[in-house]
């Protein structure tokens, strides 16, 4: 099966695009508006960019009527957003916070999530989440789509403060991923949970491997 996206119709009943680009980490992002309304929403286009200094990005598609997402506007106007790790234990709250609400609705309350005061960011963090990045806003890059909902805001940020709960660490100081069980976005309505981890080391990498492993 193959098809040209510009000239041919997809021969499958569902698009394979998102189902092929998996697993995708979830950007469960909290922000606050200049009016003091807290916002919480998951984004399935989220990723780290580099590590020195740590920088991240998330992509937010517009609404069908052309409105931009509250997370984007809040990050631009306040200069901050917070990433909260989405875990299997928090999956229902993540799903509830994905609903589209008016800008005056606090998604923390709707999702039944407690707020934790951040160190630098003006908005709160998800108290139940084991890991957080407080990110300062860098810039927004807009890519026009074939439709209003296809148009996307790509937001770049710099990680200024990292939080990791003590219970999420192994005795030797690494994240205990099988214990935390982060969830990832798949295609369709599917998600995956990370509860099995294996290690591979690059042959002959030497000192370069320290950067891959994340040694301080």
Image (cartoon, rainbow, N blue to C red):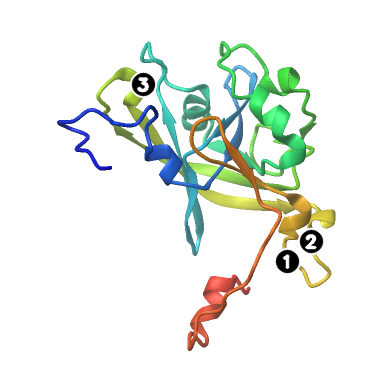
Residue 102 in picture, x, y percent from top left = 56, 10
Q: In front here: 136 or 210? A: 210
* Mark drawn on residue 142: none
Q: Is residue 85 left or right of residue 43?
A: right
Q: Is residue 157 visible?
A: no
Residue 133 percent location from the top left of the image: 63, 47
Q: Is residue 7 visible?
A: yes
* Residue appearing at x 47%, y 23% in the figure: 69
Distance between the alpha carbons at the discs numbered 3 and 1? 39 Å
**Numbered tag placed on residue 149 in the rendering:** 3
In which quadrant of the rendered image does the C terminus lie? bottom right
- What's the distance in space between the residues labelled 3 and 2, CA to CA? 40 Å
Determine the image quadrant of residue 6: top left
Which type of secondary structure does the marked residue at label 1 adopt? loop
The number of callouts visible is 3
Could you say which quadrant of the image residue 112 lies in?
Answer: top right
Q: Nearer the viewer, residue 191 or 57?
A: 191
| Residue closer to the observer: 25 or 115 | 25
Give the mark nearer the N terminus: 3 vs 1. 3
Of mark 1 and mark 2, the one earlier in the sequence is 2
User: Which callout, 3 or 2, points at the residue further toward the start of the chain?
Assistant: 3
Disc ID at residue 174: 1
**Picture coordinates of residue 161 (x, y %)?**
64, 51
* Label 3 with label 2: CB-CB less than 8 Å: no
Judging by the rendered image, the residue that carries numbered circle 2 is: 169
Q: Is residue 208 above or below residue 17?
A: below
Residue at position x 38%, y 27% in the image: 13
What secondary structure is marked by label 2?
loop
């Amino acid at each position: 099966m193959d098809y040209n996206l510009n000239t041919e119709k997809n021969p499958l009943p569902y698009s394979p695009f998102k189902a092929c680009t998996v697993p995708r980490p979830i950007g469960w992002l909290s922000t606050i508006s200049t009016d003091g309304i807290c916002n919480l929403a998951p984004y399935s286009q989220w990723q780290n960019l580099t590590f020195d200094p740590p920088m991240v990005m998330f992509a937010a598609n517009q609404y069908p009527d052309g409105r931009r997402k509250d997370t984007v506007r809040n990050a631009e106007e306040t200069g901050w957003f917070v990433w909260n790790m989405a875990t299997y234990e928090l999956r229902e709250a993540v799903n509830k916070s994905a609903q589209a609400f008016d800008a005056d609705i606090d998604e923390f309350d709707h999702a039944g999530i407690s707020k934790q005061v951040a160190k630098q960011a003006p908005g709160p963090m998800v108290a139940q989440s084991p890991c957080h990045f407080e990110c300062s806003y860098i810039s927004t890059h807009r890519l026009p789509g074939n439709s209003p909902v296809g148009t996307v805001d790509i937001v770049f940020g710099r990680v200024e403060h990292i939080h990791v709960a003590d219970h999420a660490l192994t005795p030797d100081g690494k994240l205990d991923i099988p214990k935390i069980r982060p969830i990832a976005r798949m295609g369709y309505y599917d998600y995956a949970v990370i509860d099995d981890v294996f290690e591979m080391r690059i042959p002959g990498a030497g000192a370069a491997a320290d950067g891959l492993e994340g040694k301080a």
